[in-house]
Amino acid sequence: MQFEDILYEVRNGVAWIIINRADKMNAFRGTTCDEIIKAMNKAGYDRNVGAIVLTGAGDRAFCTGGDQSAHDGNYDGRGTIGLPMEELHAAIRDTPKPVIARVQGFAIGGGNVLATICDLTICSDKAIFGQVGPKMGSVDPGYGTAFLARVVGEKKAREIWYLCKRYSGAEAVAMGLANICVPADQLDAEVQKWGEELCERSPTALAIAKRSFNMDTAHQAGIAGLGMYALKLYYDTEESREGVNALKEKRKPEFRKFFK
Ligand SMILES: CC(C)(COP(=O)(O)OP(=O)(O)OC[C@H]1O[C@@H](n2cnc3c(N)ncnc32)[C@H](O)[C@@H]1OP(=O)(O)O)[C@@H](O)C(=O)NCCC(=O)NCCSC(=O)c1cc(O)c2ccccc2c1O
């Protein structure tokens, strides 16, 4: 399988899916989403793979969400908003293997959502977690908000989305957003160790456990699907475009000027 935006490697039974767009801080465009979906399915149904790692290339970012240079009212791919976000999130949740987010640098916006949805998160002491949606004219109306509240609790999730603060790896562990934080030079070894340990467990027991954990929040896919249509309408407003424009022009957005 040939990929343009990602790398796919199997290391001793652990499949590594690496977003390979370091120049864009591993932001995803349509192609990136489609390739991650394919890779999740490939790893999920490969009998020689016991665990999956999702990460980004380089040390500056895990993933900074939607590629804003490919965002002009809509993103550049397929789906309601020009990115198949519902399918990407479903691919991570539905693949029958545990998915570990390996977080170095920024896990911001949709990158933060991807890490949240993964089964486990291992981060380095250089990791920075956070949301940017209301700062740049977007929001994730599904797992990124509703599921986050299940992970870190309602108050913290609302703080994360409303205030768009940044959080260290240690803070992410304290709030339950990450499982463990290790020094940056030990991150790869730690992630591979967890992956290989998962390979020793019964794959069927893990698959059933994963489905069972997912069951409790499966209805959130409905909120996401419906919300995408609301988001599409929002992206067509001056208020939302102000966020993208301000980011490109490296200035503070003035949303209230456009609020109707
Ligand atoms: C990540 C940052 C906080 C880093 O700041 P810093 O000051 O360290 O670095 P720079 O800002 O100078 O960035 C360096 C370089 O990288 C480019 N870049 C960074 N992020 C992106 C990006 N997302 N898209 C395109 N390019 C990016 C940046 O432009 C610089 O390039 P130069 O050429 O100028 O050197 C900071 O960069 C930052 O805040 N980035 C933007 C983050 C962002 O807005 N992300 C998108 C949010 S929306 C989203 O992700 C999203 C997610 C979902 O899950 C959704 C689900 C459903 C619906 C919608 C969703 C959605 O919209």
Image (cartoon, rainbow, N blue to C red):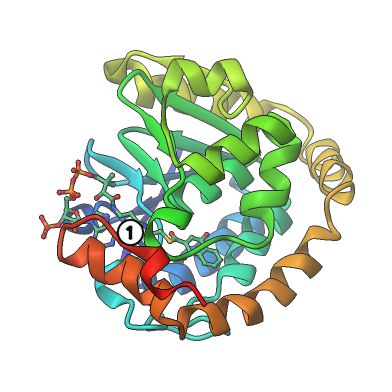
**Residue 175 seen in render:** yes
The location of residue 154, given as percent across then percent down, is 73, 35
Under circle 1, the secondary element is: loop
Q: Vertically, is 184 above or below 56?
A: above
The location of residue 185, given as percent across then percent down, is 27, 17
Looking at numbered disc 1 in the image, what kind of residue is underneath it? Ala
Q: Could you tell me which residue is drawn at 39 percent across and 54 percent down?
A: 135
**Residue 51 seen in render:** no
Q: Is residue 199 left or right of residue 39?
A: right
Badge 1: residue crowd in 10 Å (few <14, some 14–19, many ≥20): many
Q: Is residue 162 left or right of residue 10?
A: right
The location of residue 175, given as percent across then percent down, is 61, 21
The location of residue 48, given as percent across then percent down, is 60, 47
Ligand 1 found in image quarter: bottom left
Q: Could you tell me which residue is drawn at 48 percent across and 74 percent down?
A: 34
Tell me: is circle 1 under 8 Å from ligand 1: yes
* Disc 1: which residue: 27
Q: What quarter of the picture does the N terminus occupy?
A: bottom left
Q: Could you tell me which residue is drawn at 39 percent across and 83 percent down?
A: 73
Q: Could you tell me which residue is drawn at 77 percent across and 66 percent down?
A: 223
> Closer to the camera, 252 or 144?
252
Give residue 86's quadrant in the image: bottom right
